[in-house]
Image: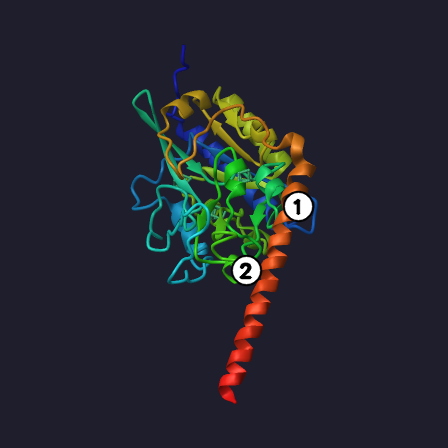
Amino acid sequence: MSKKINFNLTRRSFLKLSGGAAALAGLSLPKGADAATDRQLATLIDLSLCDGCKDLQAPACVTACKTINKDKIPEVVDNIPEPWPRKTIEDWSKKKGVFNRLTPYNFIYIHKAQIEGKTIFVPRRCMHCDNPACATICPFSANHKEKNGAVVIEQNQCFGGAKCKDVCPWEIPQRQSGVGIYLHVLPGFMGNGVMYKCDLCDERLKQGKMPGCIEACPRKAMLIGPRRDIEKMADERARAMNGFIYGKTENGGTSTFYVSPVSFEQINKTMQKKPGQPDMKPDVKRRMAATDPLGKSVLAAPALGVIAAGVLNWFAGRKDQVKKEEKGND
Ligand code: SF4
Ligand code: SF4
Ligand code: SF4
């Protein structure tokens, strides 16, 4: 039988939770939260506090993220090369305003679940996994985990092959075609753009600033701090609301802990899943656990060979072009 949900937090318990949260966030971030230290950060997302910013045109966290990342993607080329053999071009450059799903221009959205006549609002973005399969599989090492816990894609090294999306249990990374290094190597034969996702505002963290979405949340439904403190807080909140945690063990552990008064089985069952709107399957097994060292090396060799061929090809073409130009000038 399903547990009765209690969303009616008393004013006292809300203040206690949000006050504790502010203190934690304030205490923890500015010092020692960068990649130069071994201190890992984690985030807590408390579903009993998020109300989806119902009264706003778009949720505050989403707007903040969009503003911070608005110039991340360079101008997309006019004629996007058609990749071979699959001819799928993914172009979101004319739909930058979409905010109700993940796109290369939108790294966080609010997923809704209807349970017992109530709506649960679930902010979704990259979980920043402890052993991210997305980084393990990347043949170009464009994807890595920082010491502060952020999983970051280096956009100038990414070919947009989307393997990271295939192995991510939640299919988080999103592709924009017609941008990136592949345009200069073998467009049409290798690569198809660049993958984009939440990077935990890594640059801001390194400057001692809060991630934009967390700073903007009016209800302090999201918090960031040293991992040990956040994990402890997640446990305490889950206990206090007789609730549940998601993200602690999924995919071998992550640095994002969702706390909810209703089980994630129920949330997952009542979520509408569509492309760019991932589910919340509980007990997700760790992806690529057995193939960590293998994945990259097996994929890397052919990939590097093709890049080398592509670069040589590009230089050869360039040489011919220069010769022609020189002839024309004679
Ligand atoms: S996490 Fe905060 S900012 Fe985002 S929708 Fe929920 S209440 Fe609004
Ligand atoms: S959630 Fe997906 S994209 Fe994010 S770190 Fe984990 S495997 Fe990678
Ligand atoms: S941490 Fe930064 S990049 Fe990630 S969702 Fe929040 S604002 Fe966007």
Q: Which residue is mark 1?
A: 147
Against 172, residue 78 (above or below) is below
Q: Which residue is mark 2?
A: 185
Q: From the top left corner, tell me how far across and down residue 27 is, in percent.
A: 59, 44
Q: From the top left corner, tell me how far across and down residue 164 is, in percent.
A: 54, 42
Find numbered disc 1 in the image and state the secondary structure of the residue it sits on.
loop
Locate the N terminus and report the quarter of the image it occupies. top left
State which image quarter holds ligand 2. Answer: top right
At label 2, counting other C-alpha atoms closer than 10 Å, the crowd grade (few under 14, some 14-19, many 20 or more) is many
* Ligand 2 neighbours mark 2 (CB distance < 8 Å): no
Q: Based on the displayed image, in which of its 4 quarters is residue 116 positioned? A: top left
Q: Does residue 33 appear in this view?
A: no
Its colouring scheme is rainbow
Against 75, residue 248 (above or below) is above
- Residue closer to the observer: 180 or 37: 180
Q: Which of the marked residues, 2 or 1, is nearer the chain's N terminus?
A: 1
Closer to the observer: label 2 or label 1? 2
At label 1, counting other C-alpha atoms closer than 10 Å, the crowd grade (few under 14, some 14-19, many 20 or more) is some
Name the amino acid type tagged 2.
Answer: Val
Q: Does residue 62 appear in this view?
A: yes
Q: Are marks 2 and 1 in contact (CB under 8 Å)?
A: no
Q: Based on the displayed image, in which of its 4 quarters is residue 74 positioned? A: bottom left
Find numbered disc 2 in the image and state the secondary structure of the residue it sits on.
loop
Q: Name the residue furthest top.
A: 1
* Ligand 2 neighbours mark 1 (CB distance < 8 Å): no
Q: From the top left corner, tell me how far across and down residue 328 is, in percent.
A: 49, 85
